Every structure is written in C-alpha cells, then in structure tokens.
Amino acid sequence: MNTIDAKRLILIALVLFALGVCRANAAVDDRYIAGYAGAVLEREFHLKKNAVTVEDGVIALRASELKGADTDAILTALLGIQGVSRVVIIEVEQGFTYEPQRPLVVKDRDKKGAETEGVLFPGSKLFAPLIADPRWAHFSVAYHHYNNDEKLKNVGSTSFGETFIFYRGKAFLDGQWDLGIQAAVFAIFDLDAASKDLINADYWIGFPVSYRKGPYSALFRLFHQSSHLGDEYLLNNRTNRVNLSYQAVDAKFSYDYGDWLRFYGGGGFLFDQEPSELKPWSLQYGIELRSPQTYVSGHLRPIAAADLKNWEQNNWNTDISVRTGIQIEGEKTVGHKVQIMLEYFRGHSPNGQFYERPIQYLGLGTHFYF
C-alpha cells in the first residue's frame, strides 16, 4: 500500500468516526432534552414527565396530557431549553380508520416563537379510505369468480395507486384540512385465456381536499378517468369499443361512531364526458365496521364494509360492493395496513368500458394501504 492510499484510508476512518460521534451526541442531546423538558412539565406545570417525546431537537406533546394547562406558557418554557428547535402539540385521533392512531398537529411553534400555519407532507390522511369502494386509489390484487356471465368466469383484478398528501393546515371550527393527489390504474384480466388477456384498464387521477374535526371528516375531489380495452381482448372478442373518458367532481362526508363504526355518503357530477350522452349525477354511501378487539398479539383485526352507488346513467339502480375479512396491523405500522378480504359485487360493472353491463362476482382480495 502506498503513502497516498494510506492517507486516504486514515481520512475515511476519521470522517466515519466523526459521523459516529455526531450521531451519538445527537442521541444524547435528545435524551437530555427529554429529561429536562419532563422536569419542567412536572415542576412548573404539575404534568406527567413522560408526556414528552423528542426527536432531532423537536419536542412533541400529546394534547390529551395537557388538559387544563396553559399551552402557550408550556411552549414558551420548552422553547427556552438549549437544543430545542420546535415544540409540537399533537392530538391523537381515535376513530374508525385504517390509521387507528393518527397524529394531528394542534400547535406548532418554532424557536423564533412563530406559530406554523401548515405542515408539508404530514404523513397521514384526514379522510380514511373507503375500503369497499371498487374505485378507491390503492394497491390490491384479487381473484373474482363471475356468476352467469356470457364471456367471463375467472377474472384477476388489480389496482396500483395511492393518495399522497402534500400540505396540511388549520381550518375553520378548530379543524384541519389537507391537499393531495390520488392516482391509480384499475385493471382486470381474463384468467381463462391462454395469455391471461388484459380486458380493461381504467386510468384515474384526482386532486382531493380533505377536512377533519374530531369524528367528522369530508372529502372534495376533482378527478379524471379514461378507460381502455386490452389489445388481446379486442382481437379475441367481438365487442363495440367505447371511448369512455370524463372529468368529475365529488364530495363525501364521513362520521366515526367511536372506534368501531363509520358512516359516509355523498354525490358526484360528470362533465366533459365522452360519450357526451352520459348522464352526470351519482350517489355513493356506505358503512364500515372495525372490531375494537384484536387477535394474535394485536396483529389481526376483523373488519367489514359495504359500499353502495346509484348512477343516473343506470336509472339509479343500486350497485352493491361488500367486503369482509381481517386487517393485519401493528403498533409500529401505523398508516401501513394489509387487508385480506372476501369480496362480493352485484350491479353495473365498475370497469369503464363495461359500465352498462350488469355483473355479479364473488372473490378474494388482498389490499395494501400506505
């Protein structure tokens, strides 16, 4: 080994050692801040010292631990501790949602004493997914057995998508609002075909604005959908292709009754639709149940849901989607859930090219929420 290589190795070792020292010091600093902040809460405000957590110099307090206390005085006192950059007071919502513990920022004050008006990329959602909605943006894979259908019997169904929240801020009535984007592809495949033909793919993108106050939440969206038949399906089947696409707006309102029951309902309106004769109005409503009891060391939770839709185009007939099964969860995976569900659907097909076609299926699906 020459002198230059030896110097490089020594320099790299020194840099790694310095990074390790800095990391260790950061951890010590957080522990020091947590202890100091806990002592301040206990001595000056007669609160529990374990009500505080610290990460990278940011103190987080649960609002439930501060009832009756002067929060402004607490913020001022904790911001005076050396090494503290921000103090955040959060409220942990307990309601029927795939995020059973959803932190909502109540107050957020930085070192300069200014209250933060909003949070970028908050990491949670104010409006929980509709778990029985066949057109909710998320990742899933399912097998469906079609009953008494002329062309389809064994069908594979997939969706690829998610909701991303960009910004969260304070709203009226002491609530919160957020802004995000939803995008997804919904596709079905003929499992009886030699090459498992792609039958239909719907491309979907939306811009949701959500609101939450306690157990009440609401969602307003502007979205676009376009629908396409698979090439192999077109070659192997005689069918009239429909160039289906539209823009739409919808609004939904939700209420959590405790931590086990949820009701929701709303409506939508299509515009700039093709075919132009598509009638625009629709209704959607449903119910979701979530067992308060978990099993297998808290990792399995029974759930069930029913989603109903009425579309003016289909003479207001009711489309019924029912799902029931288990949700796999854990304390360290808040906001990340896997659901294994038995699925039943009866009504007009949710798959765009076949919107006028009545279908009925029973199946088994796996759904992922992040």
Image (cartoon, rainbow, N blue to C red):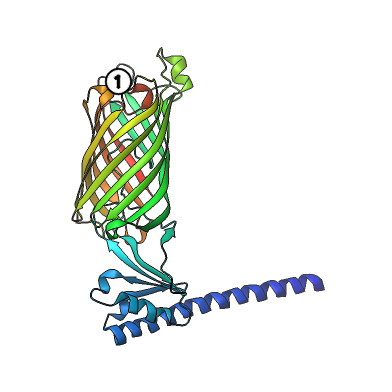
Residue 34 in view, yes or no: no
Give the residue number, with chain letter if any, for mark 1.
357
Instruction: Return the x and y of residue 318 as percentages of the image width and height.
Output: 21, 28
Q: Residue at x 35, y 84 (%)?
A: 40
Instruction: Return the x and y of residue 326 as percentages of the image width and height.
Output: 26, 47
Instruction: Return the x and y of residue 303 as percentages of the image width and height.
Output: 23, 47
Quadrant of the image for the N terminus? Answer: bottom right
Taking 114 as reference, is 361 left or right?
left
Q: Residue at x 62, y 73 (%)?
A: 16
Q: Is residue 89 above or below residue 222?
A: below
Q: Is residue 292 above or below residue 246?
A: below
Residue 220 in view, yes or no: yes
As drawn, the residue found furthest toward the front would be 172
Instruction: Return the x and y of residue 176 as percentages of the image width and height.
Output: 33, 57
Residue 315 is drawn in which quadrant? Answer: top left
Crowding near pointer 1: few (<14 within 10 Å), some, many (20+)? Answer: few
Residue 298 is drawn in which quadrant? Answer: bottom left
Taking 164 as reference, is 311 left or right?
left
Specify the amino acid type for callout 1: Arg
Count of numbered marks: 1
As drawn, the residue found furthest toward the bottom would be 43
Q: Secondary structure at mark 1?
A: loop
Q: Is residue 83 above or below residue 360?
A: below
**Most foreground residue, 86 or 237:** 86
Q: Residue at x 28, y 47 (%)?
A: 218
**Most foreground residue, 16 or 276:** 276
